[in-house]
Amino acid sequence: MQFTAQELGLMLNGTVEGDPLVAVNQLGKIEEAQAGSLSFLANPKYEQYLYTTNASVVIINTDQVLARPVKSTLIRVDNAYVAISILLEKYNSIKLHKAGIEQPSFIHPSAALGENVYVGAFAYIGPNVKVGDNSKIYPQCYIADDVVIGNNVTLFAGVKVYFDCKIGDNVIVHSGTIIGGDGFGFAPAGDGTYNKVSQIGNVIIGDDVEIGANTTVDRATMGSTIIHKGVKLDNLIQIAHNVEIGANTVVAAQTGISGSAKVGENCIIGGQAGIVGHISIAKGSQIQAKSGISHSITDEGKKWAGAPAVSFSANMRSLIVINRLPELEKKINELEKIITELRSSH
Amino acid sequence: MQFTAQELGLMLNGTVEGDPLVAVNQLGKIEEAQAGSLSFLANPKYEQYLYTTNASVVIINTDQVLARPVKSTLIRVDNAYVAISILLEKYNSIKLHKAGIEQPSFIHPSAALGENVYVGAFAYIGPNVKVGDNSKIYPQCYIADDVVIGNNVTLFAGVKVYFDCKIGDNVIVHSGTIIGGDGFGFAPAGDGTYNKVSQIGNVIIGDDVEIGANTTVDRATMGSTIIHKGVKLDNLIQIAHNVEIGANTVVAAQTGISGSAKVGENCIIGGQAGIVGHISIAKGSQIQAKSGISHSITDEGKKWAGAPAVSFSANMRSLIVINRLPELEKKINELEKIITELRSSH
Amino acid sequence: MQFTAQELGLMLNGTVEGDPLVAVNQLGKIEEAQAGSLSFLANPKYEQYLYTTNASVVIINTDQVLARPVKSTLIRVDNAYVAISILLEKYNSIKLHKAGIEQPSFIHPSAALGENVYVGAFAYIGPNVKVGDNSKIYPQCYIADDVVIGNNVTLFAGVKVYFDCKIGDNVIVHSGTIIGGDGFGFAPAGDGTYNKVSQIGNVIIGDDVEIGANTTVDRATMGSTIIHKGVKLDNLIQIAHNVEIGANTVVAAQTGISGSAKVGENCIIGGQAGIVGHISIAKGSQIQAKSGISHSITDEGKKWAGAPAVSFSANMRSLIVINRLPELEKKINELEKIITELRSSH
């Protein structure tokens, strides 16, 4: 896609300064942009780059004062940051525009698709599946029996959704994510082997949830594993059976949440953290990356760190001493020597 | 699927008390169940819920004494827990019933499929593959050249099995799991770059193994990576080349086992644990979540924790002191002051 | 595939001792090999196995002296290790030989495929995609709009590449890996919910890179996430948006690198390590498994360990004291008692 400065100026309701016919076909940071790129300057702190950038077109604020001449074509707008956000969304919606039913795909005759649904080639939509309006099922997705998918949902290529799961409106799920695989439930048979416990629950994903790539959300043993409205999960996260994650909680990559744990609303959980099963995390908790949460957190809105985790500040204090442990031990040994001398000379 | 209390009573050889025509179409925990749900009471400890539940039908033990009237229809059976297990399995086997060869699928003419095999649409079965009786290859699975798959195996949607790998009987593999990808083997070329070491071994998976979603089991450099009979692996686990995992060992999510490590039988390994390469873990070892095992464990049946791991009890003792380190340091500094005074006044 | 000792001798320009017609159809370690296997002895340290092995054919060095009779057929070559490497590569290239366009596959009319390209069944190649010569796109791969793929590239079954990404020459990507999923970028809306930040950058993968199975490499918010030439990534790794990994750096399984981190050339990063966002790691750094890197590393070529990481040697010293903490605390308490006595008796 290529646009001239003039076309962009019209789109953004801005004023063009310089050659209106110069064209751009990519976006770049002002300090790294090449010829043919569009860039922007929203923060006056970076004004210096305006005079050295190779960007062909730069969007700037109306009130930006120029100290020196600029070789790029400028587009002046009320708010450069808002303007670039609008462009990014337009760009993305063009890039992500997909429509129609590609062939070959597998759509069971009993499945019900809404208006304006995209089904990519090699996607599989099983018996009794319902897909809402304007949803996009990319190639190689698998939607098993009786799954219900809301409106404006995007499942990128290769997402797998097991039977009976429910996905709300405006949900985005990235490639390779598995929703509704069996919970890890086995009962010892007494002879060292295990019997599988049937996992007959499902997964319910609320509206406005986004889930990254290659994450796994297991179905409940009975009942539902629930990801509430507005939750954001990163890549390679493990959500075990019967977990419940409160609204608007954000979880970074490679974190694992064990069976039946309940995480409150508006929590922020760092990467590679672990939460043991059957505990509750109070709403607004902030959990540092790599932490191991082994007990319920009942106090709302606090910060936690370490494995097993303690309060963030207690963890900081302990870490400082840990790095001084060898000298501390030396000091203790010296004190011991002095005391022995004192004692014997006493 | 909908059943009346009467139908369930016949299936379970139980006695119906209350309206035999009331119908249920889902299962729920007794304390959460809605109207239209089936529930059960196996543990007399939860008797209280029997009087408040909204479940339409509840399965209870024959000898359960009622203290108050109950509004649900009851089905009395010898053992409510066994009865519900039977129902769950029946439910699951109906839900997971799949048969026949869906189109389009790719089955190489040299592949040999057993009796009553399911091949989902967009599944790929390569040259010389053998699939045993009653096995199910869900949509979008990829089975490469010369793979051998036993009887009663279920590979859920999107499982990939590289060439030459062998899968035993009654194995279940969940979506997105990759079996037989190359081991991570590179030889330094001397100039900072690396040469790939060809990975020509395979993966052998024993009978009765279950593997979760998005787990990776690498092929051996030479010989076999072996997952023995009855092993249960959770989601997002990394099993490196030439690893061997003993029978009936259970590994929780996001654990990583490095190249050529040998894990004994009947071990229990928590989530996010790591085991370094070329070591052995004695049978019956129990490894705490997030542990890092850096040396061989020769003592059977012991518990380990920490990174690097020590015995569970030693780890507990150290953790207690770690959280007291700041006060311990303060105490040492105070003792030092006193000693200096004592000494100078001496 | 089956070869006689005679055929192997001709291939390797070696001398056959024993039955030249004995045939082998698999490879095995000399100490584990079964009848029908080919093995080799390169290291004289393992000579003992030569007299007990069940391998039908063993490749040995010309100058290997035999102390006792050997029942296997021997093939003598100048360098047994080099000979076996040649055979492994031949074996692998036969096993991995794939050619042609399998049906059904989806190739957009605007896509441009080079000479001798393999496209597996159920692979999806989107609009304007370019694929170089001799590249292999295995079944069920998804290559989105405008992706550029170099020469001699192998994408194993089920790899997904989002739009606009670029992959260099001689790259290998294993099954289930996702390239170009959205970076994890959300701006707080002020009411507890989040607005998605459009992720319009891409991923650039240099020549000679290998990426394991089920790894995720997110696209940049703007600009590019860059994996430079010769990098080797293992399985289940998370590479966040705008990360840059320097040439020939090696990263073990389950490690996570957060947004905008820059890792230098020729680093070695162990498994399950974590690197926080927006920091730089000096070239040649060696990072121990499970480490957490929370600050930039400016000193080149050093070893780091712990979470948060310190120098490898400082970490070792602290770890030694940590395991002695309980006895250290006891000692401090005893010293305290003595001091109190000394003081009172003073």
Image: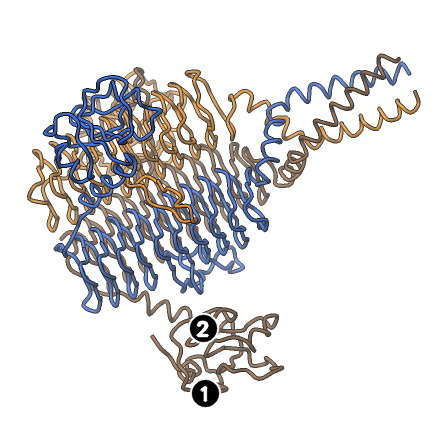
Chain colours: A orange, B blue, C brown
- Position of the C terminus of chain C by quadrant: top right
1 and 2 marks on the same chain: yes
Q: Quadrant of the N terminus of chain C?
A: bottom left
- Chain label for disc 1: C
Looking at the image, residue C140 lies above or below residue A83: below
Q: Looking at the picture, how far across and down is residue A135, in whole percent? A: 15, 34
For disc 1, the neighbor class at 10 Å (few under 14, some 14 to 19, many from 20) is some
Depicted B315 relative to depicted A16: above or below? below
Relative to B76, is B315 on the left or the right?
right
Frontmost of labels 1 and 2 is 2
Label 1 or label 2, whichever comes before in sequence order = 1
Element at badge 2? Answer: loop
Viewer can see residue A301: yes
- Residue C154: give x, y in percent of width and height: 32, 57
Disc sitting over residue C34 in the figure: 2
Q: Quadrant of residue A48?
A: top left
The relative height of residue A345 versus residue C72 in the rendered view (above or below) is above
Where does residue B211 sit, x and y in percent of width and height?
A: 35, 48
Amino acid type for the residue under numbered disc 1: Asp
Total labels: the figure holds 2
Disc 1 versus disc 2: distance between alpha carbons? 17 Å
Q: Quadrant of residue A127?
A: top left
- Name the residue beneath numbered marker 1: C19
Q: Amino acid at mark 2?
A: Gln
Q: Residue furthest right?
A: A345
Q: Quadrant of residue C300?
A: top right
Q: Nearer the viewer, residue C346 or B29?
A: B29
Q: Nearer the viewer, residue C186 or C220?
A: C186
Q: Residue at x 44, y 72 (%)?
A: C86
Query: Where is residue C129 drawn, in percent x and y?
Result: 22, 50
Which residue is nearer to you in this view: A265 or B174? B174
